[in-house]
Amino acid sequence: MFASATIQRMDENLYLVPLPVPIAGFEGFITAWIYTGGPVALIDVGPSSTKDHLISALDEIGVRHLDWILLTHVHLDHSGAIGHISRAFSKTPVVCHPKAAEHLIEPQRLWEGSVKTLGEVAHRYGPIAPVADTQVLTADQLRVPEIIPIATPGHAPHHYCYFIGDVLFAGEAGGVCLPVSDTRYYMRPATPPRFILEIYLDSIDRLIARQPQTICYGHVGMRPDASAMLQTHSDQLRLWQQLVKPFFASAPEGGEDSLTACLAHMLDSDPLLSGFSLLSPAAQDRERFFLRNSLKGYWGYFRDKDVSLQGGV
């Protein structure tokens, strides 16, 4: 047993560390994964406001050395603490998408964009500190037999997943999947602007083709039926395309009233959202915020397609 009740040993060499973000409703929502069964790897580091908690968890597990820090993407809830963690493990390479490298080395634009998109939530996550350029290794240059990086644009253009054996560390390539009871889960798309459905679906297909057995979500937890869960999410993305399109057609500008009406319809019509009612009131508020952001991604997707069609492309 660990002194910290938040550390969860998921397998012999796999630990889940929920990170205590100081926002109501975010309890247990943001996590880091620690793998110790061969190469010692930390997958995602959470926001900077939880850096001390993560460093303490690593120490409590007995991790004194990291071979790799693997970032699925550089959104603040996954990578905001990377400047601090990389300094604590200054010999450890930080692996990321090639498009993300410059934002880790000089994170000011990333921080400003995050504040613009997330507002007060970004401030609660905390600003991201820079990583030494000598520590940054792009995922396409990673040459380790035990770790297979897969580019998976969709949730973000700079998104990567990592296979270690038959375990898939998915970040948000499989959406958000929250257990709401022993037998039920709540799943939603994570499709903020700019979102392109076909790119996201192609990424999921390439993950399924590798036949993962276990999926480790960024939000939240682990499931043994990885390929089936990925297919379920792919089907959900297509369902959202059908459900959102009429609302976009009636209000292409995507005003707040249209988003509110569409969100209510989604909660009534998507069976994978049925667990919403089992979330705490604060967690429901959190999910409404992110659901609206995902709907904005679909609005932008339809708007871009309309422009392409009008231009004859």
Image (cartoon, grey):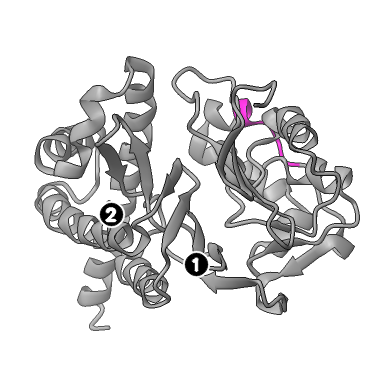
Give the image quarter of residue 154.
Answer: bottom left
Residue 142 point in image, percent of width and height = 71, 75
Mark 1, Cα crowd under 10 Å, few <14 / some 14-19 / many 20+, is: few
The amino acid marked with disc number 2 is: Tyr
For label 1, the residue is 166
Kindly identify the residue that appears in the image at 78 percent across and 34 percent down. Answer: 55
Q: Is residue 120 left or right of residue 25?
A: right
Q: CA distance from mark 2 to mark 1?
A: 32 Å
Q: Which residues are magenta?
A: 123-128
Q: Residue at x 58, y 57 (%)?
A: 72
Q: Is residue 275 left or right of residue 282?
A: left
Residue 257 image-quadrant placement: top left
Q: Is residue 260 above or below residue 225?
A: above
| Residue 172 in view, yes or no | no
Residue where numbered disc 2 is placed: 298
Which disc, if any, is residue 231?
none
Relative to 252, residue 266 above or below = above
Answer with mark 2 or mark 1, whichever residue precedes in sequence.
Answer: 1
Badge 1 marks a residue whose secondary structure is loop
Q: Is residue 283 magenta?
A: no
Residue 5 appears in the figure: yes
Q: Residues within 10 Å of mark 2 (few under 14, many from 20)?
A: many
Q: Amino acid at mark 1?
A: Asp
Q: Position of residue 139 (x, y in %)?
A: 66, 71
Please name whichever residue, 97 or 309, is drawn nearer the observer in this view of the structure: 97
183 and 160: which is toward the camera: 183
Badge 2 vs badge 1, beta-carbon distance below 8 Å = no
What residue sits 67% from the left and 42% below the top? 80
Secondary element at image label 2: helix
